[in-house]
Amino acid sequence: MESYDVSYGPIPTNHSSLFNSMLYPFTRLVIYGVIWDQGEANGASSTDDRYSCFFAKMIENWRQIWHERTNGITDIQFPFGFVQVRNFISISIVEN
């Protein structure tokens, strides 16, 4: 019997593909806030000014989309919380 091999090609990982496939289907649901956990490995460094600009724009965009797609029921200024996990790898050990 021959093996059945299905190859769909590379999985898209650009920002719009991820949003369109994972979040957009839920934009008709009324939400009351978001909790965002960036994670340790893929967050920008604290010296990267672009990250704060991109993040602010993303929040603005999400608020607009949810507000419009729920016909104004989702508050245009719904809260957006951030979760930050400490990076335990950066702990230095001091020897006596």
Image (cartoon, rainbow, N blue to C red):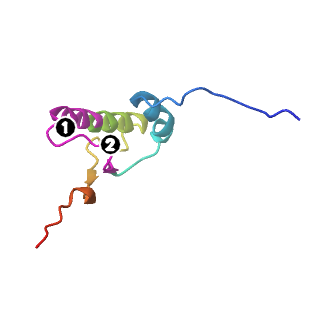
Q: Residues within 10 Å of mark 2 (few under 14, many from 20)?
A: few
What amino acid does circle 1 point to? Answer: Ser
Is 79 left or right of 31, judged from the image as shown?
left
In the figure, is residue 34 to the left or right of 91? Answer: right
Q: Secondary structure at mark 1?
A: helix
Which of the labelled discs sits on residue 42, or is there none? 2
Verify whether residue 48 appears in magenta. yes
Which residues, given as a range, are shown in magenta? Answer: 36-58
Q: Which quadrant holds the N terminus? A: top right
Q: Earlier in the sequence, mark 2 or mark 1?
A: 2
Question: Between residues 92 and 29, which one lies in front from this camera angle?
Answer: 92
Residue located farthest toward the top when viewing the structure as drawn = 9
Q: Residue furthest right?
A: 1
User: Residue 2 versus residue 61: which sits nearer the camera?
Assistant: 2
Q: Looking at the image, which residue is at 25% across and 44% down?
A: 77
The residue furthest left is 96
Q: Mark 2 is on which residue type? A: Asn
> At which x and y percent is residue 42?
32, 42
In 3D space, how far apart are the residues under numbered discs 2 and 1 (Cα atoms)?
14 Å
Q: Residue at 53% x, 31% y: name it.
A: 11
